[in-house]
Each structure stands twice: as structure tokens, then as C-alpha cells.
Image (cartoon, helix red, strand yellow):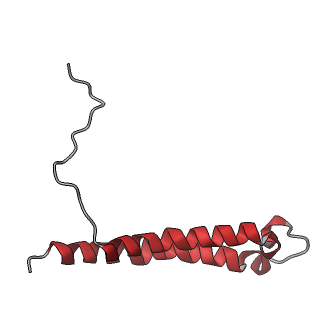
Amino acid sequence: METPIVRHIPAEAVTRSTRARVVSLLGPTTVAAGLIWGILQPWRVTLLHPRGQGFWWLVIEPPVLVAVAGVIFAVVVARPLLTDLEAHDAAPR
């Protein structure tokens, strides 16, 4: 009996180097740090109480900037860097 839900797992598991793991975790760790910072110091995030504040005052907040920097790093820097690291690790020596 076969079910269409079962997937075939490749025999060889893909192993990443320590450098690749560290690079792939930098972005999410930075986003988590920004979110934790915003939770621990809610008075720093004026989005929660925008009484009479202008646009830039609301957008340019350190916890928000840290979270945005983590997302930008993960998308713009880490993905191409991981591709290069994987190509370097796969190259014959």
C-alpha cells in the first residue's frame, strides 16, 4: 500500500559547516534581539503610544531598527554568502 503523503528522504543528509550555521543564524538572532529589546523596554517603542509624534519619530526607534537590520542582513547578505560558502565547501580540494 502506498500513500501520497510519504516523502522520500535522501540517503545523504546535507551538512553545513560551522561558518554557514553562524551566518544563517545572525539575521534571526538580530531580529529576536530587537523584539526582546522592544518587549523589555516598551517605552522605547513609541508605536505603542504615538501621542503627538511625527512619522520619523515613530519609525526611527532603536528596537525597530535592530529588527529591520536583522531582516535586511538575512535577505541581502546572508543568502548570497551562504551560497558562496556552500560552493566553496563543495569545491574539490
* Outermost residue, front side: 18
> How far across and how far down the image is residue 22, in percent?
40, 74
For residue 33, side relative to residue 71 (left or right): right
For residue 88, side relative to residue 33 (left or right): left
Q: Quadrant of residue 77?
A: bottom left
* Outermost residue, top side: 1
> How far across and how far down the image is residue 47, in percent?
79, 68
For residue 30, side relative to residue 54 (left or right): left
For residue 74, side relative to residue 4 (left or right): right
Q: Quadrant of residue 1?
A: top left
Q: Nearer the viewer, residue 64 or 91?
A: 91
Q: Name the residue at 28% across, 72% down.
A: 17
* Outermost residue, left side: 92
Q: Name the residue at 61% across, 77% down.
A: 66
Q: Quadrant of residue 62?
A: bottom right
Q: Name the residue at 26% across, 77% down.
A: 84
- Total marks placed: 0
Q: Name the residue at 51% across, 68% down.
A: 28
- Vertical order, 7 against 58 (above or below): above
Q: Nearer the viewer, residue 24 or 57?
A: 24
Q: Quadrant of the C terminus?
A: bottom left
> How far across and how far down the image is residue 64, in percent?
67, 73
> How far across and how far down the image is residue 86, in percent?
24, 72
